Amino acid sequence: MSYHKDLRDYLDHLDRAGKLRRVGRRIDKDTELHPLVRWQFRGLDEDERTGFLFDNLTGLKGLNYPSRVATAIMAPSREVYAMGMMCSPAEISQKWSAAYARPIEPRLVTTGPVKEEIHLGKNLLEHGGLDEFAIPMATNGWECLPRLTAVSWHSKDPDTGVVNVGTYNGLQLGPDRTNLRCGPGTHLVVHWQKCRKRGVPLQAAAVIGAVPAISMVSVAKVPYSVSELAVAGGIAGEPIDVVRCETIDLVVPATAEIVIEGEVPTDYMEPDGASGEHTGYTIVGRRVFAFKVKAITHRKNPIWHDFISQMPPSESSTIRGLAGEGRMTSFLRDGCGINQVKDVAFHHCAGAWRICVIRFQDIAGVRTHESVVWQALLASQSIATDWPKMVIAVDDDIDPTDLESVFWAVTFRYQPHRDTRIIQGRGASLDQSSGSYSASYEERRFPTGTTSPQGASSILMDATRKWDYTPVSLPKKEYMENAKRIWEELGFPRLKPKAPWYGYDLGIWAEEDERLARLAEKGEFDKVAEALMSKGRKLTPTDKVSGGME
Amino acid sequence: MSYHKDLRDYLDHLDRAGKLRRVGRRIDKDTELHPLVRWQFRGLDEDERTGFLFDNLTGLKGLNYPSRVATAIMAPSREVYAMGMMCSPAEISQKWSAAYARPIEPRLVTTGPVKEEIHLGKNLLEHGGLDEFAIPMATNGWECLPRLTAVSWHSKDPDTGVVNVGTYNGLQLGPDRTNLRCGPGTHLVVHWQKCRKRGVPLQAAAVIGAVPAISMVSVAKVPYSVSELAVAGGIAGEPIDVVRCETIDLVVPATAEIVIEGEVPTDYMEPDGASGEHTGYTIVGRRVFAFKVKAITHRKNPIWHDFISQMPPSESSTIRGLAGEGRMTSFLRDGCGINQVKDVAFHHCAGAWRICVIRFQDIAGVRTHESVVWQALLASQSIATDWPKMVIAVDDDIDPTDLESVFWAVTFRYQPHRDTRIIQGRGASLDQSSGSYSASYEERRFPTGTTSPQGASSILMDATRKWDYTPVSLPKKEYMENAKRIWEELGFPRLKPKAPWYGYDLGIWAEEDERLARLAEKGEFDKVAEALMSKGRKLTPTDKVSGGME
């Protein structure tokens, strides 16, 4: 089966699966669009969340936009994200590992749909430039300009030619002008630094609405020497078709909706507007790069692709979280060789990357040694300076994506003084707990005061069982299955079973316990009572008794 | 408005509110009843959970029971629990504080519905003794006898006469015989120890199906010198009517469905059967008290009252959790005088008591000092030996009942090395993480090896903001309210808004930020762009640049 041929093919797929809400009603892109879609993240369960496609848009400038807007289409839920990968939700992590292991280089083609309309040179603004597109406002009431969100920025290393694709956002400053926010350490910044040294601007292309695999790799932490375009090919299972840009020396996906070509000056920076971030806070007072548009190419009736980011959970926390899980699982299993790691879950509430649950599995029936659990907990700190911040190790029977399941394990399988390590000397980008906002950006990014209130750290918690336990206190599987049939016969509401939903043995369950349970199943309560009471015992005056349950 | 007059009045109330599922289909109390109701705790959201009333019961012995069974009726959800208190969910905590502050002593009456049928002496077993009631099996497939669950055991201090009411469970060993599980430190055990010293058995009455306030106080950690009957009166807002027992020197609620009078030998103990516990594990290998029935009195067509306990979330984790929240809030605010404590939430996944979130509020606009936060975190360890085990302090804008909200705060308002204290020397009843099951009961209850893997501890985390933050990255309230109207007009699924659902100021928001946001609201994007770009700046070769977002 070939991969989604373009964004429109993918949207049709979502529509057929009931995972796209089409809004034909007139909507103001600047005041109504984001708040409307935001509600599904603050008011619906994940399985009710869908993508949105807006067909009829206006804005504060009073324009009627010819372009549509698709938002929350990549990752309103794990289920929809899996549709973009053409796999099941359970296969996402494996699909990522395979894409890292077997990347497929892109294929250069002569032209593609993205060239249906070309605006450049003195005709750049013939259709309004960027104003041709309905670019929505986000974090309404705080932000001050329309915001570019689901943009995959393409740029390349001037020394090696390796292309980076990264999702960075920015504000629309005019018909041919945006800014560009990319944090320290991101790969576009490396390219920018190299160009700055050469005294030339950085060429860059902002790609909007390529196939889903491009959006997925674009938010992932792909190692510097690996091209995201090849990892996207690995996800798609086929090469991504690319075409040459018109005015700069870059290739871009041939079926994208829109490509904005231009340059990032390397001798200039400017103040940013307020920006809602995935941490749940609206950052102010930054300076950022500028971006000057040289050409715009796009499909007819273009679809502007937008992300719902900011306060988690959001589309951003899902798409970034799942990419992070793929990267972390691949690193721990393939990079560090810890094949006892079954999978990894990142949590929305932590803005995707900062709470990480690592689930362990027995290999060939051999229980994972505690030292291996700690190898993985410590290794989790190895792929970034500032995440994950809280890492929790759990056993195979825990659902790492479910906070209730994880904290059930923390409550009864973890002892704080024995099973905790706190690691200092960590970075803290965008995390205001590391230091007051009055400190310099550099000081907040890596707080050096390790004994003062300033400073950043992470906490590692081993919530795996250290020895055998008694069985889980739920009815055995056959009882729960039978009761489910009765439940359905009675017409009660649809069940969404949570793990665990039946009881199982965890190593401590004696033959006599089993014998009594089997007698009970036959209704032979008299024999059970007899067995227990026959071992009753008179207390002597010196017997110590702490309670009627000991 | 007077309080619920009896259990049946309360059940009618639930039925009218759509919070009771009546099951007329024939159900086996020993194999089907608990697994069926268990599904609502493993497969439905809390707002879909209800009480259950079974009218048509059989069991493994093939009997047709004249008695009905009501289960999960007290606390399938916070909402239903509030109905038992006759208040709103938000008023539960306050209602508890008031009941502790203003208890109302019970009123002795000459007779009541519970005396409609009386079986004692040589007629004790005329209707089958305990076999007259449909006592369900729990944790099916593991446990070995029918289990008494929602029983409020009444007993009194032989020195002071103060009555204790406590919920302890046990197994039905025959028509006139049960066992009785009450852990070390429980008040019934104190009575038992005093009677043991005098060489007499302990008189006790097992009360089933009294008014909801009795079930509520019965699971609460009411201080020893205070009678639960008086606290129940405080909740009801009127005295609880009580009648004298037939064969022992105790009073019991007059409108209860069933009262079982008897004695607990103080010179005898016996082995327990396997027992599913609220921790999520099925405990084995204990010894327990015995209970010998002397009389049974009950209403006609009695309703056997049952709890769904074991693996959390369950009815038990809700009813115990809410009582614990009431006790902790009252202790911190009234006992310790920390009026900055707004409320406290205990979490299901921790079996009710072990994860505790304390929410702080500013008093008269003065921010709570960090030392007060720590006073409360440490004080939380003062009312029990073994709970809470994980305590998290949060600000007023966090929903303490929502794990996602709490861990959003932990992620971005907490630094592990600065904001964590680990407290050793704690107890650990029923918590298998403190030591292997091969250790003695006493060693597991209070593990003394503080440097070895054995031992028990708790972790305190301050996840309050230490300084001003930038605004929450959600649209302002008016945008979200307007979008909610559009959402409803479009016929999208019903919203259950989660806090926070709009953005608010947290102290850092400059006049210039506000000016640009107001310009944007008027669509004056050109003026905004001009304001930002006019402050753009050429970089000199020595300017240090860490990224395009700094």
Image (tube, coloured by chain):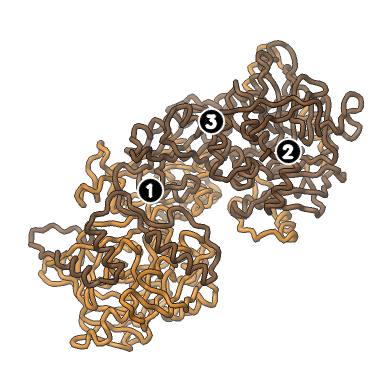
Chain colours: A brown, B orange
Query: Looking at the figure, which quarter contains the N terminus of chain A?
Result: top right
Left or right for B130, reference A338: left
Q: Residues within 10 Å of mark 2 (few under 14, many from 20)?
A: some
Q: Mark 3: which secondary structure?
A: loop
Spatial CA span between label 1 and label 3: 28 Å
Percent x, y for residue B444?
24, 49
Q: Amino acid at mark 2?
A: Lys
Above or below, B208 against B429 in this view is below
Q: Image quadrant for the C terminus of chain A?
A: bottom left
Within the image, what quadrant is residue B449 found in? Answer: top left
Classify A246 as above or below A209.
Answer: above
Q: Is residue B12 above or below residue A106?
A: below
Distance Cα–Cα, label 1 vs label 2: 48 Å
> Do the residues at discs 1 and 3 belong to one chain?
yes
Q: Amino acid at mark 1?
A: Thr
**Residue at the spot of label 1:** A411
| Residue in view at x 34 percent, y 32 percent | A371
Residue A524 placed where, x, y %?
A: 25, 71
- Residue B330 appears anywhere in the view: no
Instruction: Residue type at mark 3: give it.
Output: Ala
Decide which of tag 1 and tag 2 comes sooner along the chain. 2
**Circle 1 sits in a helix, a strand or a loop, which is it?**
helix
Dot 2: chain letter = A
Residue carrying label 3: A428
